[in-house]
C-alpha cells in the first residue's frame, strides 16, 4: 500500500474471495480457538482467578464437556494456553495435546503486554515457549493475545514490540488480528519487508461477550445471557463465509461455553456446520501452514511506497 | 446569597445552544469536553429555597432558550420527490478506517480493526451497491487518500459521491487549523474525484462549511426530513441521520471508548428488522431514510448479507429512489422557498 507506520499493519487490499483456495478442494476453512484462561483483567491470570468456581469449571467439568463435544464432531481445536497454565495444569495440557489438539501460547499469564519494556517482554515470551514445551514436548508455533472480558477494546492486545519478538523467536503466526477475515500479514518493517502471518479474530463470535456479560468482576450490574445472539452470529457469519469461500473462526472459553444450555447451543451450531461436506476443519497451525505455502509474503504481500505528506499538526 | 448571582447561576445552568448532543459531537470529530454538573435550581446545597420570582425567572430562562432553538431550524413540510418517487433512501458510508482510532490514540489491534474497513469492507460495499445498482455517498477523511487510494478511485469510477468527513476525523478547536483541515480534505478528494466535494459530515462551523462551497451537512436528527439550519442569518441544508440507523450503534464494541459494560453486539437479524421497520414507516410517509454505515463494521460477511436482504426488500416496493446525499440535497434546494417552514419571529 502506500505504507504508513503507526496507522497500518498490512497491505492496501485484502485477498479477494476468488483468490482464496483451501486444501483438498474444500470450499471454506473453519477453525475453533479455545482460550484456556480465566483471566478477566489486563494483568492476566491472578491467584484469585485460579481459586474459585470459574477455575474449577474451566479445568474440570466445563473442559470435559467441551472436549466431549469437540470429539463427537471430530473437531481438533487450537487451545491458546498461558505459560502459567501449562505449568500448573501440565497434565491437562498434555492430555489436550495427546488428543490431537494444537497447543499455542496465550502470553505468560494472558496479560496485556502493551506497557512491557521489550527486554522484559522477551524474557516472558521465552519462558512461555519453555513452559509449553515442558508440558507437551513441543514448542508452540502460534501466539495469541486474546481479549479479556474487562478490556476496554474487545480486540486483543500486543505491545509495539510483540510481533518483532515473535518473529525473532520463530513463531509461524499470530493467532488473532482484525485487519481481515482471512489470514493476512502483519508488517513490522515495510522496507525488507518483515511480516508475521496473522489469523482472523472477531469479537462477535467470541463466547465471552454474550454469556453473563459484563461479568461481576466489572461491578457493572449483572451480566446478561445472550446465547441466541451468539448462536445467530455464528450461523450468519459461517454461512456468509461459506458462500464467499473464506474462513470462519470462533473463540470459546471452557468455563463459559462448557455448561448447561450453552453446550446445546454449541452442539446445534457444530451440527449446522457439519451439514456441509466441503468445510475444511483445521487448527490455526494447519491454516497457517497452508497459507504460507499458498500465499507466501514474497508473492502475496503487496506493499507500495508511502505517499504520506507531513503537516505541522500531524498526530505524531 | 446575592439575588443577582442566583439569577445569573440559573441563567448559566439553563442556557441551551443549538449544538448536537455530545455523542454526535464526538462521533463527528469534536474534541471531547467534560460534562458539567448543573444543580437543579432550588435543590439542597446548591441554591436557596425557591421564591415566586425565582421560579418565574426559571421559566423565562427556558423560554429564551426555546425561542433561540426554534430560530435555528426550518423544517421541510413536503419533500415533493421527483415523479414516480415515493421515498428517498440515502446510503451514507463513513470511510473511517483507522483514522478516528488513530486520532483517539487507540491501541494497535483497534487500528487493525479499522484497517478491515479499508482493505476489505469498502470493497464489499462497492460490490453490493454495484449488484443492486445503488448509488451512495462515501464520507471520507481526507487522509484516506494516503492509505486507500485504489478503493477511493473505484468508488468514484462506480458513480458514487465522495464527500468531506474531516481530515483525520477530528475538528481542531483552533479556527485557523480547522480551515486548513477543510481545505486539505477538499483538495485531496478533488484530486481523486476530478471535481470538488459538495457536502460534509462533520462539526465544522457552519460558516466554514459554507465557505468551502458545500451545499449540505449530514449530521444529527432534528426531524426525519431534510431541514435548514440557520446560523448568523445564513442557512445550510442538513440531511438528518439517526443513531438508531447507524451500524456503529449495534456492532462497534468500544465505540468512542465506551467500556465493556456498554457493549454493542447485536445480531444481524435484529438490526435488519429495526431498519426495515424504520424504512416502512418512512415509506408510508413518503419520506427519507439516511442509513449510516462503516465499512470496518458492516463490511463483515454476515452484515453484507444482511444489507443485501434489506436492499432486496426495499427494491420489492415501487418508487424507492436510492440517491446520493448530493442528489437529495440538489432536489431539496431546488424546492420553492416556502417548502421550508421557519418559526415566525
Image: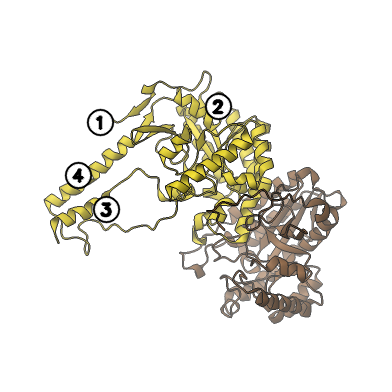
Chain colours: A brown, B yellow
Label located before the other in sequence (1 or 4): 4
Label 4 resides on the chain identified as B
Determine the CA span between mark 2 and mark 1: 37 Å
Disc marking residue B60: 4
Label located before the other in sequence (2 or 1): 2
Determine the CA span between mark 4 and mark 3: 13 Å
Label located before the other in sequence (2 or 3): 3
Q: Nearer the viewer, mark 1 or mark 4?
A: 1
Discs 2, 3: same chain = yes
Give how far across and how far down residue A167 sits, in percent.
Answer: 76, 67
Q: Is residue B252 visible?
A: no
Q: Nearer the viewer, residue B15 or A102?
A: B15
Residue contact at pointers 3 and 1, CB within 8 angstroms: no
Determine the CA span between mark 2 and mark 4: 46 Å
- Residue, disc 2: B320
Label located before the other in sequence (4 or 3): 3
Amino acid at each position: 500500500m502506500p505504507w504508513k507506520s503507526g496507522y497500518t499493519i498490512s497491505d492496501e487490499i485484502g485477498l479477494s474471495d476468488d483468490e482464496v483456495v483451501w486444501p483438498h478442494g474444500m470450499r471454506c476453512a473453519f477453525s475453533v480457538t479455545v482460550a484456556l484462561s480465566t483471566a478477566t483483567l489486563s494483568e492476566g491470570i491472578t491467584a484469585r482467578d485460579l481459586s474459585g468456581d470459574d477455575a474449577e469449571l474451566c479445568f474440570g467439568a466445563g473442559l470435559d464437556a467441551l472436549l466431549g463435544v469437540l470429539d463427537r464432531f471430530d473437531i481438533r481445536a487450537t487451545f491458546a494456553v498461558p505459560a502459567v497454565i501449562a505449568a500448573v495444569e501440565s497434565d491437562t495440557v498434555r492430555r489436550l495435546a495427546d488428543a490431537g489438539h494444537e497447543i499455542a501460547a496465550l502470553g505468560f499469564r494472558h496479560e496485556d503486554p502493551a506497557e512491557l519494556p521489550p527486554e522484559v517482554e522477551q524474557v516472558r515470551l521465552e519462558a512461555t515457549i519453555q513452559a509449553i514445551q515442558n508440558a507437551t514436548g513441543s514448542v508452540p508455533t502460534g501466539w495469541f493475545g486474546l481479549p479479556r472480558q474487562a478490556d476496554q477494546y474487545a480486540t486483543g492486545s500486543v505491545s509495539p514490540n510483540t510481533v518483532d519478538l515473535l518473529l525473532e523467536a520463530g513463531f509461524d503466526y499470530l493467532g488473532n488480528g482484525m485487519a481481515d477475515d482471512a489470514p493476512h500479514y502483519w508488517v513490522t518493517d515495510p522496507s525488507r519487508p518483515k511480516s508475521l502471518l496473522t489469523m482472523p479474530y472477531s469479537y462477535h463470535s467470541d463466547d465471552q461477550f454474550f454469556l453473563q456479560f459484563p461479568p461481576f468482576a466489572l461491578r457493572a450490574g449483572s451480566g446478561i445471557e445472550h446465547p441466541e445472539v451468539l448462536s445467530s452470529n455464528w450461523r450468519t457469519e459461517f454461512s456468509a463465509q461459506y458462500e464467499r469461500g473464506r474462513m470462519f473462526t470462533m473463540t470459546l472459553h471452557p468455563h463459559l461455553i462448557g455448561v448447561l444450555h450453552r453446550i446445546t447451543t454449541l452442539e446445534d451450531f457444530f451440527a449446522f456446520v457439519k451439514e456441509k461436506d466441503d468445510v475444511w476443519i483445521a487448527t490455526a497451525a494447519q491454516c497457517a501452514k497452508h497459507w504460507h505455502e499458498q500465499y507466501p509474503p514474497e508473492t502475496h504481500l503487496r506493499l507500495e511506497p508511502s505517499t504520506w505528506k507531513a503537516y505541522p499538526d500531524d498526530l505524531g | 446569597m446575592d439575588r443577582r448571582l442566583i439569577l445569573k447561576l440559573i441563567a448559566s445552568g439553563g442556557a441551551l445552544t443549538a449544538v448536537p448532543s455530545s455523542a454526535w459531537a464526538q462521533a463527528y470529530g469534536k474534541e471531547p469536553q467534560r460534562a458539567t454538573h448543573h444543580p437543579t435550581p432550588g435543590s439542597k446545597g446548591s441554591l436557596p429555597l425557591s421564591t415566586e420570582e425565582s421560579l418565574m425567572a426559571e421559566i423565562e430562562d427556558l423560554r429564551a432558550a426555546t425561542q433561540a432553538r426554534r430560530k435555528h431550524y426550518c423544517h421541510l413540510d413536503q419533500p415533493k420527490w421527483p415523479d414516480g418517487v415515493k421515498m428517498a433512501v440515502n446510503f451514507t458510508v463513513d470511510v473511517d478506517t483507522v483514522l478516528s482510532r488513530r486520532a483517539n490514540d487507540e491501541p494497535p489491534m483497534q487500528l487493525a480493526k479499522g484497517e478491515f474497513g479499508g482493505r476489505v469492507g469498502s470493497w464489499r460495499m462497492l460490490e453490493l451497491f454495484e449488484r443492486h445498482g445503488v448509488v451512495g455517498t462515501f464520507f471520507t477523511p481526507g487522509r484516506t487518500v494516503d492509505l486507500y487510494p485504489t478503493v477511493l478511485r473505484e468508488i468514484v469510477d462506480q458513480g458514487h459521491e465522495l464527500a468531506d468527513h474531516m481530515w483525520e476525523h477530528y475538528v481542531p478547536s483552533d479556527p485557523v487549523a480547522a480551515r486548513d483541515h477543510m481545505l486539505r480534505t477538499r483538495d485531496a478528494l478533488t484530486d481523486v474525484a476530478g471535481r470538488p466535494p459538495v457536502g460534509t459530515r462533520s462539526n465544522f462551523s457552519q460558516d466554514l462549511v459554507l465557505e468551502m462551497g458545500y451545499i449540505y451537512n449530514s449530521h444529527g436528527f432534528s426531524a426525519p426530513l431534510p431541514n435548514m439550519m440557520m446560523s448568523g442569518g445564513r442557512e445550510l441544508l442538513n440531511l438528518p441521520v439517526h443513531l438508531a440507523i447507524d451500524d456503529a450503534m449495534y456492532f462497534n464494541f468500544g465505540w468512542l471508548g465506551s467500556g465493556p459494560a456498554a457493549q454493542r453486539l447485536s445480531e444481524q437479524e435484529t438490526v435488519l428488522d429495526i431498519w426495515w421497520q424504520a424504512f416502512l414507516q418512512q415509506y408510508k410517509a413518503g419520506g427519507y431514510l439516511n442509513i449510516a454505515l462503516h465499512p470496518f463494521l458492516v463490511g463483515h460477511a454476515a452484515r453484507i448479507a444482511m444489507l443485501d436482504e434489506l436492499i432486496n426488500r426495499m427494491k420489492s416496493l415501487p418508487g424507492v429512489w436510492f440517491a446520493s446525499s448530493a442528489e437529495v440535497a440538489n432536489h431539496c434546494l431546488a424546492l420553492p422557498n416556502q417548502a421550508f417552514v421557519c418559526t415566525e419571529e
